[in-house]
Image (tube, rainbow, N blue to C red):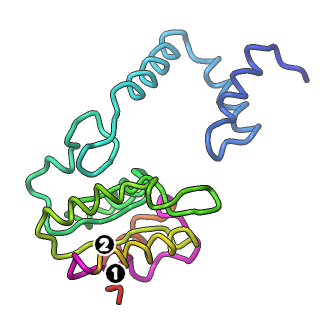
Amino acid sequence: MKYTRPLLKLIEEFQKFPGVGPKSAQRMAFHVLNKNIKDVEELSKTIIEAKTQIKKCSTCQNLSALDPCEICSNTSRDLGTICLVSEPRDLLAIERTNGFKGMYHVLGGLISPIDGIGPEQLAIKDLLQRVGKNNLHEVILALDTSTEGEATTLYLHRILSPICTKITRLGFGLPVGSELEYADELTLTRALENRTEII
């Protein structure tokens, strides 16, 4: 069946979202078309507001409408522990566990020479400044167990070792090759509790 051009364009736009195939995109498009115009305008307004208001926190690089973000400005957090994650969605996954009360630093990706991503493209310079300024007692490397995650972990361990006394990584509980954002809360909680020091 051939769709009318505006519907086809809407389906194509939804298909650009990660993990959305043709059938899911089609369902989403028909869902939008079945909504009243007020609901669609509200959705459109919300997307535009999120895009224009949300920026990177100047301290931890997390996404927030505030600077510093809600976590960095929370005085009850443990300033002596920083958990490194590759993306804001990984930070959210760890926060959902309610098991970590320290600070975060979002790298903005993982080292991947094949994709042209080296240490210079990540927020490592900002991290080193934070580690140098603060009296840290632990840096947790909460990175994916993929090849890129392992490469980034080794690199960070090498550059942080001279300036940080305790460097740990998430412990058992995360399957090899998995991504943090898809891990359930219990798995992430156990991984945090069983983190191990990198030697």
Q: Which residue is drawn at 35% across and 61% down?
A: 94
- Quarter residue 123 falls in: bottom left
Q: Mark 1 points at which residue?
A: 195
Q: Quadrant of the C terminus?
A: bottom left
Binning the other alpha carbons within 10 Å of mark 1 as few (below 14), some (14 to 19) or many (20 upward) gives some
| Camera sees residue 130 | yes
Q: Is mark 2 on a helix, strand or loop?
A: strand
Q: Is residue 13 left or right of residue 103?
A: right
Examine the rendered structure and indicate whether residue 151 appears above or below residue 76: below
Q: In this view, does 44 lie to the left or right of 63?
A: right
- Report the disc number at residue 140: 2
User: In the rendering, at what x and y percent does residue 131 appear?
Assistant: 21, 65
Q: How crowded is mark 2: few (under 14 residues within 10 Å), some or many (20 or more)?
A: many
Is residue 185 a member of the stretch shown in magenta? Answer: no
- Residue 58, x across and y down, in percent: 25, 44
Q: Give the range drawn in magenta.
A: 162-181
Q: In this view, does 61 lie above or below 5?
A: below
Residue in the image at 32% along x and 86% along y: 197
**Position in image of residue 7 (x %, y %):** 74, 18
Residue 16 appears left or right of 88: right
The amino acid marked with disc number 1 is: Arg
